[in-house]
Image (cartoon, rainbow, N blue to C red):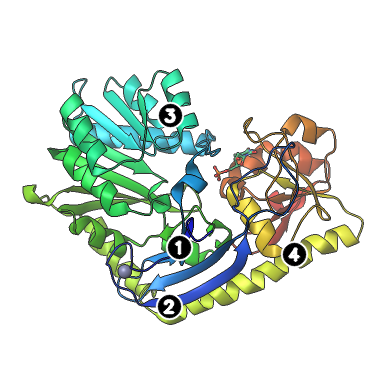
Amino acid sequence: MQDIVRPIDQCRVCGHNDWLDVVSFGSTPLAGNLLGPEDDPGEETRFPLEVVVCRECHLMTLRHVIEPDVLFGHYRYVASDAGSIVQHMRRLVDLCTRRLGLTGQDLVVEFGSNTGAHLELFQQAGMRVLGVDPARNLAEMANDRGVESIPSGFTAHVGREIASGHGRARLVYGRQCFAHIPDIHEVLDGVSALLAPDGLCFVEVPYLVELLANNQFDTIFHEHLSYFSLGALCRLFESHGLRVVDVQTAEVHGGSIVVFAAPAAADPEVRPSVTDMLAEEQRQGIAEERTYRRFAERTERLRTQIRDLVRGVVADGGTVAGYGAPTKGSALLDACGLGRAEIRFCSDTTVLKQGKILPGSRIPIWSPEQAAEQVPDYYLLLAWNYAPEIIEKEKAFLENGGRFIVPIPEPRVISAETVL
Ligand code: TMP
Ligand code: ZN
């Protein structure tokens, strides 16, 4: 156990070692580690889940780091193909193509490229693409769809190898993976080694300010090591000779930021979006202890309210199932002490997840087709980040008297009457 879990000694961004305790969820199983029906139902390994904030740069992070191989060796997270995500990916392709004037000769490299769905869009636009992802099973899926992918973490060595084999890249990016990586300095060394002098790098991360403001406590789980503000990212990029030149907000994964950086040596212009957001972060109290204390208080209140709401429905004879089986859903159920006694199953469209069992709560994951045979009175919307499109898609469920319990940012019940 000591070999695979270690307490953080220095801040991943600034190197200081002065932490403010934020919230603790005790010891929990790995929320993304879905079990197969054949897996031994014995005691699961639990790992400490505590969140702290660096007093120097305000990086929010888990206090303990788990060996990445344990978390990501065989990774079941398949990037979503929900309409809102595909639309967002297309927007990013258009924006980068326009801004960099990308042509067919240009190389685009993604780290944490998952099954290659995003790179495929660049490929369709004519660019040369290359993916890098440590999960072998996912890199293989990407290669199968024709998106060349290296099964590896992204390091300085990998960056140099790609540069010498394929030339420098005009665009190097990572979406929704930066928070998972313990050694982000190594990744940025890789970016520096690979990026063309006139190139651009972007990272997309869930935004700490949204997490705090919207009580997204369920997005805190072992895979998510870091919770970034723009300020922390600026500091990180700067220490690698990269300058943050632009930032955009994106309504994905509960509210994310896309942070663009360019080699500082070229003295690139910084757009007002950066200075504006940095000022707004200060106004939002990112540097104040009470901001984190209040978040912890709201988290404790929500854990109880969500549990009481679901148990109340069950006590009144209602049936409840989970809508979606995202990793944060398994984290939420665990944090709220909900299990099979309350939740019959979770319905999820991801084929890889169907037939599996949630860790901790041991709730089975069903396909939507299987779920249609035992429609519950209430769906607990674990995939709340897709609430608008799911509620639209499930009109018939609501019209037949079904209800959604939306847990985040505040627990609320939605019925056909509330939607109309
Ligand atoms: P994500 O937030 O990590 O993308 O996970 C969302 C999960 O919810 C994913 O496993 C797919 C599932 N899902 C459904 O089952 N039905 C839906 O309509 C949507 C949008 C997602
Ligand atoms: Zn720090």
Residue for point 45% across, 81% down? 290
Confirm whether residue 277 shows in the render.
no
Front residue (pair 78, 90)? 78
Q: Amino acid at mark 4?
A: Arg
Residue for point 52% across, 33% down? 81
Label 1 to label 3: alpha-carbon separation: 28 Å
Residue that mark 3 sits on: 139
Residue that mark 4 sits on: 307
Closer to the camera: disc 3 or disc 4? 3
Label 3 sits on a secondary structure element that is helix
Pointer 2 with pointer 4, Cβ within 8 A: no
Label 4 to label 1: alpha-carbon separation: 31 Å
Q: Amino acid at mark 3?
A: Ala
Label 2 to label 1: alpha-carbon separation: 18 Å
Q: Amino acid at mark 2?
A: Leu
Front residue (pair 78, 257)? 78
| Label placed on residue 20 | 2
Asked if the beta carbon under badge 3 is closer than 8 A to the nearest atom of ligand 1, the reply is: no
Disc nearer the start of the sequence (1/3): 1
Label 1 sits on a secondary structure element that is strand
Residue that mark 1 sits on: 6
- Mark 3: give few (<14), some (14-19) or many (20+) Cα within 10 Å: many
Pointer 2 with pointer 1, Cβ within 8 A: no
Front residue (pair 221, 383)? 221
Residue for point 33% across, 67% down? 11
Disc nearer the start of the sequence (2/3): 2
Left or right of residue 367, residue 105 in this image: left
Label 3 to label 4: alpha-carbon separation: 38 Å
Q: Quadrant of residue 227?
A: bottom left
Indicate the quadrant of ligand 2 in the picture.
bottom left
